[in-house]
Structures are given as structure tokens and as C-alpha cells.
Amino acid sequence: MSEEQAIALKELLYKIADDQLILGHRNSEWTGFGPLLEEDIAFSSMAQDKIGQSYALYQMLHHAGEQAPDTVAFMRHADQFHNCVLVELPNGEYDFSLIRHFLFDTAEALRFDMLTRSSFEPLADLAKKIKGELRYHTLHANTWIKQLGNATPESIARLQTSLNYALPYALGIFEPSPNENIIMDAGFFQGEASLQAEWQSRVISILEQTQLNLPDWKTVTPILGGRIGKHSQHLQPLLDEMSEVFKIDPTAEW
Amino acid sequence: MYGGGNTFEGIKTDSLAQEDPIKLAEFEARIARGEKIEPADWMPALYRKQLIRMIEQHAHSEIIGALPEGTWITRAPGFKRKLALMAKVQDEVGHAQLLYSAAETLGKTREEMIHDLITGKSKYSNIFNYPAFTWADACFISWLVDAGAIVNQLANAKGSYGPYCRALDRICAEESFHLKYGHHCVIFLATGTQKQRDMFQEAINRWWAPMMHFFGPADKISAHTQVLMNWKVKMATNDDTRNQFLDMYVPKIWELGFTIPDPALKKNTDTGRWDYTEPDWEEFKRVINGGGPCNEERLAVRRIAEERGKWVREALRSPKASYVMPLA
């Protein structure tokens, strides 16, 4: 692998790992606050999967010469994170958390399916395992979107408002990496553009089974910047909270 | 997690006079033979009432207990702890789900129980009315409060009501992992830096009194109801479970080099039981009745969660669906 390719690969791994860590963290904030116990438990399960997935990816980065997973996750500043802005937004009401989960995990399931064909073998192997976990995340999201998207005027209106709000951020998932061409040429990943196209048709196929209005894609302006470390005001406080104990003494074992 | 000490503030047994004496005798004979009572079986109204009260309080304790530890999930230091604590607190919420189902078999719906919780009508384990200020407090809960709960729950698992016993068997299996997790966290604090050791010593100092309260008032001042013992609703006295806990865990705490803030605490070689300074039962009563540092906050969080989630539950309710007795 050339030096250029090694840099591009790290860029790819970091953004995926950061997405999982930050959304996993947000999902875990539902513990104790869910609209019903079953949802509390479901969001907690997904949080565990996502944080476990990020851990596996940070370990891969560690093998490639980056610092240990705990250091990477707990000691970086917000502008060193490459997650999309969507995942760092506060949980808000359940309708927003559900819509975000639906939009993000639809993309994530497709991403990891594509990654099973990555030319970087350790990533392809890991993707096979993660893909299996994500099946349940999309099953969960689709079930709820179809249920609440056809239920009461309030549930439909709430989902619609959150969908309209979340879409520009969701398009930020597909912000190309600075080294997108190298990533694609090396066969690490098929690229964000083809992922977005598949995602869009998958999202539409679910929304069509609800009473929600489909977005007019031409008028949605993507909110970008996350992939190059430009974040909303919400990420740094999340990281400060996450590292509060760890930073009491980063050399200590906890 | 549940201490069980709050449940039996004295009950009226008058209603027993109205029960069919033949059925009552058959019921008591079944329990004496070690049989389990199942939801569709005949049972005295008092038995039903006490079990609903006990299982409901246990379920509430699980969801309220998820709050002081839950706030440390987002701050857990490192991947290993973060993943384990998430799984642990998720288990506790899962226990609530199991227990509400067990209580529903007796005829009270989950919605009614949650309503009684957030309006302050029904109680939960007193210990969760204290704040978890530091990571070490969360570790104290995971290790020692769970340990206390296991002592109580293992006793209750031998009780007479089938659905509750089966739920407790599953709960105890999970709690034993929590105990291992909590102990592991504490060992790292105990063998870590001075700051880490100090953190845990301070946690012990803060939590010892609530921990002693956890098992309920001393037997000599508790309302003792023989009928509940005969019916295998209450399986061990408060002092017995407290003593069992001290027997198992005080040596472990001392072994790690920590002190316990009770100069009178020692094993009495004559009685084989532990001597300790009598806990402040006035404080216990005050906190149970709403005067603790976190009572209002805990209920407010639960109330807000219920209010914010109302539209979701309404959207799930199909007008055509009829009530189905849960499997438990």
C-alpha cells in the first residue's frame, strides 16, 4: 500500500468509526428516558452495537499505527473528529431520534454491505460481522417508521417535521472525503456518491409505505463540514462529558 | 435492584375472615407443600394485593435505579467500562419489563403501576433517592447495591408466586454479572492512584448509611406479619438479609484496604452475627416519605419521560386491540 493510500484508508476508517461512536453515545442517552421500556432497551442495544463497532475500527487504526482506542476516542478535540454533523445533534424528542436512526442506519447498512467487498481485507472481514448487526437496526427503524408514520395525526406530523429538519444533515453523511478518489481507486470503498444513490431509493421505498410526504430532493441543501472537522456547537460538550472521568488522570487505569 | 425493606409497613389481615375457609386451607396446604401459585389459581385477596405491591415496588426500583447509574454511561472512562455499564443498565430496565409483566398477571396494568409511581402513590427502593456524585459512587452501586439486591432477590426467588419466582431466577443470573463488573471496577480504583482510592473511600463514606437502610427497618421495630411468611411472600427478615450482606461483603471491603464509617462494626463471635451502630431509622422514614436529596428529581425525570412519550404510546394503541394477559 502506498503512503497516499494508507492516509486515505485511515481517513475512511476514522470517519466511519467516529460516526458510530458519536451516534452510539447519543443512543445511550435514551437509557431511562424512552417513551416505553421496550424502546429504552432497543436504543441501548443499538448504542452497544455502535460503540462496539467504533471500538473495532479504532483497533484497526491502532494496528495501522494510530494511538490506542481509548486515547483516540477520549482525548481528541471536536475539530479532530470526522463524523457527520447528523449524529452529533442532540436527541431532541423521540420523533427526531427515530428519524435520525432511520436515515443514518439505512445508509450504514448499505455502507457496510459495500465494505464487505473492500480490497482492504481486515475491513471486509469486519464489515461482514457488522452488516449482520445492522440488519436489526434497520429492521427496528423501518418497523417504527411504518407504524408511527401511519398512526395518529400527531405521530405523522411529528415525523414529518423531524424528517424535514433532518434531511439536510442526512445528506451530510455522504460528504466526500478529501481523498475520495484514492479510496475508490484503491478499492477500499465504492464511494459516497454511489452509496447516496442507493440510500435515496431505499429511504423512498420505506417512506412510500407511510403517510409522510416524500422530500423534494432538489430543494434540500446538504449540511457539510463534519468530514473535515467542522462541527456544530453540540459536539464539544458531548466530548467533554464523555471524557470527564477519563481526563481526571489519563494515565490511570479505570 | 431491590432491597425489599420498604414493602411491609404493616398490613391489615381483616379481609381474611371473608375468604372461603376451605379454599384458603387448600391454598395454604399447596404453599406448605412447596407448590407454586399460578395466575389463574385461586388466591386470597390479601395475597394478590401484597404481591402486586411487592412486585410493583421491585419493578419501580429497577427503572428508578437505572437513573443514578445511567448518568454515568456517557461519562464512563474508556471503551471497556462504557460498553459494560450500558449493558448493565439496560439489564436493569429489562428487569423492570419482566417484573411489570409478572405483576400484570395479577390484574394491574403497567400503565396503572407507572401512574402510581409518578404520582408518588407507590414506593421504590429508598437507596435511589441519594445522588451518585462521582464515578466511584456508580461503582459502589454496581458492586455493593447490586450485591445487597442479590441477597434479597435470591431469598424471594424461593417464594410462592410462580411468575415472580421465574422472573427473579432470570434477574439473579444477570445481577451476578453486574456484581462481577462492579467488583472489577472497584479493584481498579483500589489498586490505582491515590486519587482513585480516595474517590472510592469517599463513596463508601457517603453510601454506607443508605446501604444499611437498604434492607429495611430493624426486625424489632418492623411490623411482623406471620401470614406473609406462611404464604412465602416474605422470605427472610430484614435483619437476616442485612446480616448476610455484611457477612459476605465487609471482609471484601476491608481486604481492599478501605474503611467503613462505623466504629462499632464487627463480627460478634458469640452470636455469629454482626454488631453495628443502629442505623438512623428516622432518616430512613423521612427519605421514604419524600424528604431525601433526590426524591423529587427522580420522579420528575420519570414524569417527564412519561409525558414526552405519551404520543408514541397513543400511536401504538389500536382501538381494535383487546387486553391480553402477558406471559410470565
Image (spheres, coloured by chain):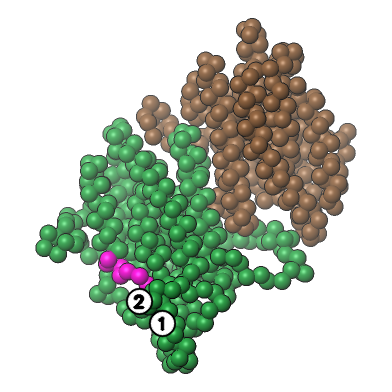
Q: Secondary structure at mark 1?
A: helix
Q: In the displayed structure, would residue A201 be above or below residue B273?
A: above
Q: Secondary structure at mark 2?
A: helix
Display colour for chain A: brown
Display colour for chain B: green
Q: Is residue A141 left or right of residue B27?
A: right
Q: Residue furthest top?
A: A2
Mark identifier at residue B229 = 2
Instruction: For the N terminus of chain B, give its image quadrant.
Output: bottom left
In 3D space, how far apart are the residues under numbered discs 1 and 2 (Cα atoms)?
11 Å
Which of labels 1 and 2 is toward the front?
A: 1
State whether residue B221 appears in this view.
Answer: yes
Residue B239 covered by magenta stretch: yes
Residue at 30%, 63% (x, y): give it: B241
* Same subunit, tags 1 and 2: yes
Q: In the displayed structure, would residue B56 be above or below residue A199?
A: below
Depth check: give the residue in front, A30 or A228: A30
Instruction: For the C terminus of chain B, give its image quadrant.
Output: bottom right
Depth check: give the residue in front, A101 or A202: A202
Mark identifier at residue B28 = 1
> In x, y percent, where is residue A58?
55, 25
> In x, y percent, where is residue B268?
14, 60
> In the image, which residues are magenta?
B234-240
Q: In the displayed structure, would residue A228 be above or below residue B284?
A: above
> In x, y percent, where is residue B144?
34, 51
| Quarter of the figure with residue B231 | bottom left
Mark 1: which amino acid? Glu
Residue at 59%, 48% (x, y): give it: A30
| Chain letter of the residue carrying label 1 | B
